[in-house]
Image: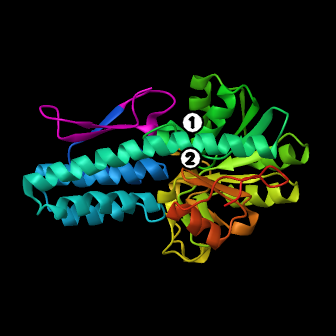
Amino acid sequence: MLPTLRWAEPPDGPALVLLDQTRLPGAEVELVCTEVPRLVEAIRALAVRGAPVLGLAGAYGVALAAARGDDVARAARSLSDARPTAVNLGYGVRRALDAYRAVGGGPAGASAALAEARALHREDAEASERMAAHGRELLSGLLPGRPHRLLTHCNTGALVSGGGGTALAVVRAVHESGELERLWVDETRPLLQGARLTAYEAAREGMPYSLLADGAAGSLLAAGQVDAVLIGADRIAADGSVANKVGSYPLAVLARHHGVPFVVVAPTTTVDLDTPDGGAIEIEQRPAHEVAELIPGVPVAPAGARVYNPAFDVTPAALVTAVVTERGVASPVTAPNIATVCSGSLPQTSRSGNGMMKA
């Protein structure tokens, strides 16, 4: 697979080159962004998507503006505003912008911004590996002595990261250890990130997977065919509430009803300690045509139908079994445990009676 994003140096650059996720799985096509407005458009169109990689896109976008001699502060604002819910986007922008300003801007600032973007890229890849290890250990404790049947929603693999991803990185680690019996993949309406992207990645990895309509997840859980639900996150509030792709909250309710662990996998950069709870998370509203049209130009609803199309929903912390980060696992999911994990002061991992790691 082509890299999710890469920096192109002169004579081909400066440019940020993206794997256009709107073209998957039919074609692997790169989208070349030589200016920030094109990158902002790509972010809004979901050509690049997923919280961690949006942070990288934001950081590289600042570096691109600096390399071009653009108004870097203005470019940073437009990048940060491109998608309001994903906290990583603003985080990446701020890191590169701070690096640019720290040396007084200009050519030195452009070099500093690019170096910071590359550092964030490396950190994200390393975080993926650590989340995969922590998540696999957690599942081994929760589901001892048997292969795992895991259900996931949206896409959380290498396409959302500078490395192996978040929740799907855990699934990959389970698969490589020979412990994956079945990966259940929600199609993820309305844009089908599960069908188009997660199934695409699972097939490339040789995972045993099955695709299902979102509405079939309840009957699957009722039939006892799911051992754990794993999702990613676009923002985690200080109290542990999780904003993720719309449809995640109903899965959490179903998982609780059926006694199935509901696990969130995300780097600490996705935790926003300045957002006190889920009610304070701004939820992005997407265009009506994403729901009203099966594919662009092919309507499935009457002309003029009013559409409610939130990109995300919020799952309260009480429904989350554990939050897996690169620094450790918060469980139970409480504000103190979230803060402890983010501070990097998580004590030596211990096991409770049910095998769950505790913060």
Indicate whether residue 12 is drawn in magenta: yes
Q: Earlier in the sequence, mark 2 or mark 1?
A: 2
Q: What residue is drawn where x is 61% and y is 56%? A: 302
Indicate whether residue 312 is drawn in magenta: no
On residue 196, the disc is 1
State whether residue 306 is above or below residue 209: below
Residue 108 lies, in percent from the top left, at 10, 53
Residue nearest the viewer, comparing 102 with 216: 102
- Image quarter of residue 298: top right
On residue 280, the disc is none
How many residues crowd around disc 1 within 10 Å: few (fewer than 14), some, or many (20 or more)? many
Query: How many badges with numbers are in the image?
Result: 2
Judged from the image, the secondary structure of the residue bearing numbered disc 2 is: loop
Q: What residue is drawn where x is 41% and y is 37%? A: 4
Residue 355 lies, in percent from the top left, at 80, 49
Residue 110 lies, in percent from the top left, at 15, 52
Asked whether, in this view, residue 164 is left or right of residue 358, the answer is left
Q: Amino acid at mark 2?
A: Leu
Asked whether, in this view, residue 292 is left or right of residue 78, the answer is right
Which residues, given as a range, are shown in magenta? 1-29
> Which quadrant, please, contains the N terminus?
top left
Please identify the residue farthest to the right as the structure is shown: 223
Judged from the image, the secondary structure of the residue bearing numbered disc 1 is: helix
Q: Amino acid at mark 1?
A: Arg
Q: Are marks 2 and 1 in contact (CB under 8 Å)?
A: yes
User: What residue did someone put label 2 on?
Assistant: 191
Q: What residue is drawn where x is 73% and y is 64%? A: 332
> Which quadrant, please, contains the C terminus?
bottom right
The residues bearing labels 2 and 1 have C-alpha atoms spaced at a distance of 9 Å
